[in-house]
Amino acid sequence: MFRKMRRYKQQVSTEKCKELLNTQWRGVLSLLGDNDYPYGVPMNFYYDENDNALYFHCAKEGHKLDAINKHNKCSFTLFDSGVKSENHWSLNITSVIVFGKISVVENAELAYEIITKLAQKYFLDKNEVEPEMQKHFKNALCLKLTIEHISGKLVNES
């Protein structure tokens, strides 16, 4: 169902992909938007390996939700900061792309728990998370991208 990587010698392991999903901060969620144009939006995320899923939060209305309601297949792409080759212009970057289906987490208690974990990833002071959740959760939705395929690649520029 999913294509094999053409430049297979640059493919990285699933373990490396999971490492990047656990350590990187942002990626781009790509959906089928208005008039079937691609809609890519930078997103914070939380990866839960046990659920084989990525989680996001968003507002309760807007372009993203309209796109998801129209077509739930999506991809999410991220890449690390790269490593500069010594004495050369090139930058070697490892990227990951995830394909799957995205949906709203309907269970409010579960959504609260997941968005709390997502917030804990980003807040420097973990004590700030709960007050922010109390203040803003009522205006947020939790999205779940169930992973169907994942691949990664080391882009070795030359």
Image: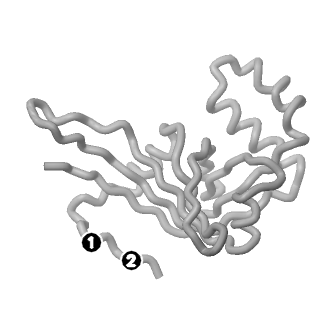
Count the marks: 2
Label 1 sits on a secondary structure element that is loop
The percent position of residue 33, horizontal first and vertical second, equals 64, 67
96 sits to left or right of 136? left
131 sits to left or right of 116? right
Q: Residues within 10 Å of mark 1 (few under 14, many from 20)?
A: few
- Viewer-proximal residue among 58 and 114: 58
Q: Residues within 10 Å of mark 2 (few under 14, many from 20)?
A: few
How far apart marks 1 and 2 lie (CA) works out to 8 Å
Mark carried by residue 6: 1
8 sits to left or right of 130? left
Q: Amino acid at mark 1?
A: Arg
Q: Amino acid at mark 2?
A: Arg
The percent position of residue 63, horizontal first and vertical second, equals 72, 59
Mark carried by residue 3: 2
Please give the name of the residue rendered at 66% of the width and 69% of the height, measured from the top-left corner. 34
Q: Are marks 1 and 2 in contact (CB under 8 Å)?
A: yes
Answer above or below: position of 82 versus 125: below
Please give the name of the residue rendered at 57% of the width and 70% of the height, measured from the top-left corner. 37
Please give the name of the residue rendered at 74% of the width and 48% of the height, measured from the top-left corner. 58
Please give the name of the residue rendered at 48% of the width and 54% of the height, measured from the top-left corner. 77
